[in-house]
């Protein structure tokens, strides 16, 4: 099963925790045939990091009001539910991702959130390099409720 990196935000994590499913808000990212062809000498970890970084960047587009943190959900899904785009790391995913298929949840820490909040406040002066310099923290799917509580997204 291919690993996908699904751009998300805190409210989407709440839905995942409550329903056990997550529907992508747009393309997911993965190691695509096009990415492999563009970087034939890269190792798998480098290709996976590229797809992950693209998902983290795409998650910025999902942030509105609320918790200003990039979120990426890593999951293993059936390949027949994916349609790779012609270039880059993007792919369309049909259906929902089940919590049982989630390998990890990655979320920005408070320092990155502050950087993102500054960027969202003045989008004309966005410093994407400063945001991308922050590494997303890793959480096991079993830590999802604690993560949401820490983000201030408590169950109603």
Image (cartoon, rainbow, N blue to C red):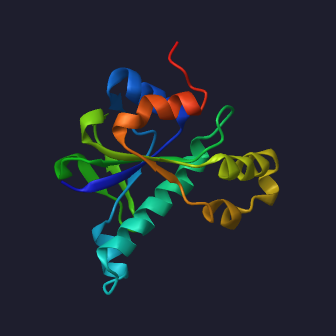
Instruction: Looking at this view, name the residue that lies furthest to the bottom.
Output: 41
**74 w.r.t. 54: above or below:** above
Instruction: Identify which residue is drawn at 55% across, 60% down.
Output: 135
Can residue 103 be seen in this snapshot?
A: yes
Q: Nearer the viewer, residue 137 or 25?
A: 137
**Residue 62, position in %: x, y?**
57, 41
Instruction: Identify which residue is drawn at 54% across, 34% down.
Output: 10
Q: Nearer the viewer, residue 31 or 104?
A: 104
**148 w.r.t. 1: above or below:** above
**22 w.r.t. 104: above or below:** above
**Residue 102, position in %: x, y?**
31, 42
**Residue 123, position in %: x, y?**
77, 52
Q: Nearer the viewer, residue 1 or 140?
A: 140
Quarter of the image for the N terminus: give it.
Answer: bottom left
Q: Quadrant of residue 36?
A: bottom left
Left or right: residue 119 versus residue 136 is right
**37 w.r.t. 105: above or below:** below
């Amino acid at each position: 099963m291919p690993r996908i990196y699904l751009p998300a935000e805190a409210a989407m994590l709440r839905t995942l925790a409550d329903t056990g499913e997550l529907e992508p808000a747009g393309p997911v990212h993965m190691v695509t045939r096009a990415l492999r062809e563009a970087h034939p000498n890269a190792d798998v970890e480098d290709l996976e990091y590229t797809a992950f970084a693209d998902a983290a960047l795409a998650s910025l587009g999902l942030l509105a009001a609320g918790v200003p943190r990039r979120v990426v959900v890593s999951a293993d899904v059936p390949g027949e539910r994916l349609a790779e785009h012609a270039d880059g790391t993007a792919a369309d995913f049909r259906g929902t991702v089940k919590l049982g298929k989630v390998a990890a949840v990655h979320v920005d820490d408070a320092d990155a959130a502050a950087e993102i909040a500054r960027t969202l406040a003045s989008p004309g002066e966005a410093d994407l390099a400063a945001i991308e310099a922050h590494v997303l923290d890793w959480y096991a799917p079993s830590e999802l409720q604690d993560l949401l509580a820490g983000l201030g997204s408590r169950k109603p």
